[in-house]
Amino acid sequence: MPKSTTEEATKSSDKIRSRSRSSSTNVPLHFSVHKPGCHFESCCGVCNLFPGVLLIAFCQVLVGSILLTLILTHGKQYDEMHQTTSSQLMSMASGAILSGITGAGVLLIIVALTENCRAMLVYLLVAAMVWIGIVSLAITKISRACIRFKDAPKIKDEQHRLANLACVSGLFTFLGAALYFFSFVVVFSFYHFRYVRRAILLHEAECE
């Protein structure tokens, strides 16, 4: 009898050690910021970004729809400014990107209200593609404007004014890309801490 009890005790202690080792090796990355037992709702400001995410979503829909309306109503002047009247390349590219921004904002509203993890992954993928498109459009605008400024002494005053407006449009597009990247980081942080926290709480429950 004493041998059996000691053997059972050693086996149980070995099981506990193996569980503790496995749990220590599978500790989530979030524990580098939060210690186990900490209340995540209060100790992490990133965990409470839900109003900010909704504000970002509504701003994307509002700004995207307004700028898209301006492109549709003043597309001819926009192409004349960027010297793409014949191909309408700049207005079509800008309209496509603004449509992507508006659609991504609507998708973010749906994701924030439904808390669908897979839909959030789809939004992050779409937002990353939209951001790459904004950066590409900004670089194209700025490069085309810089090429036009090489012939600045030869062009007329009206054409020089249009070249200035084209350069300003490229700079504002690049600023929009920076703001969109900031919003992407905020939404990604919300996604990480919102949904990964569930796995962390389950992990704490298993450890207890």
Image: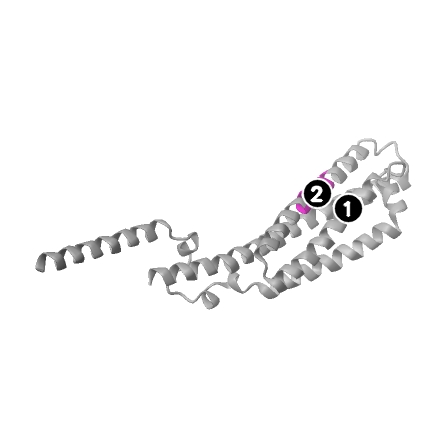
Task: Residue 174: name its quadrant.
Answer: top right
Q: Position of residue 187 (x, y in %)?
A: 59, 56
Amino acid type at mark 1 = Ala
Question: Residue at the front extreme?
Answer: 1
Tell me if residue 64 can be seen. yes
* Residue that label 2 marks: 133
Magenta stretch bounds: 130-139
Dominant secondary structure of the residues highlighted in magenta in the image:
helix
Image height of 66 relative to 51, above or below: above
Amino acid type at mark 2 = Gly
Labels 1 & 2 near each other (Cβ < 8 A): yes
Q: Secondary structure at mark 2?
A: helix
- Tell me which residue sits at (86%, 42%) in the image: 79
Distance, label 1 to label 2, CA atoms, is 9 Å
Badge 1 density bin: few <14, some 14–19, many ≥20, Cα 10 Å: some
Sequence-wise, the earlier of marks 1 and 2 is 1
- Tell me which residue sits at (41%, 53%) in the image: 28
Q: Secondary structure at mark 1?
A: helix
Relative to 186, 87 lies left or right: right
Residue 96's tag is: 1
**Quadrant assignment for the C terminus:** bottom left
Badge 2 density bin: few <14, some 14–19, many ≥20, Cα 10 Å: some
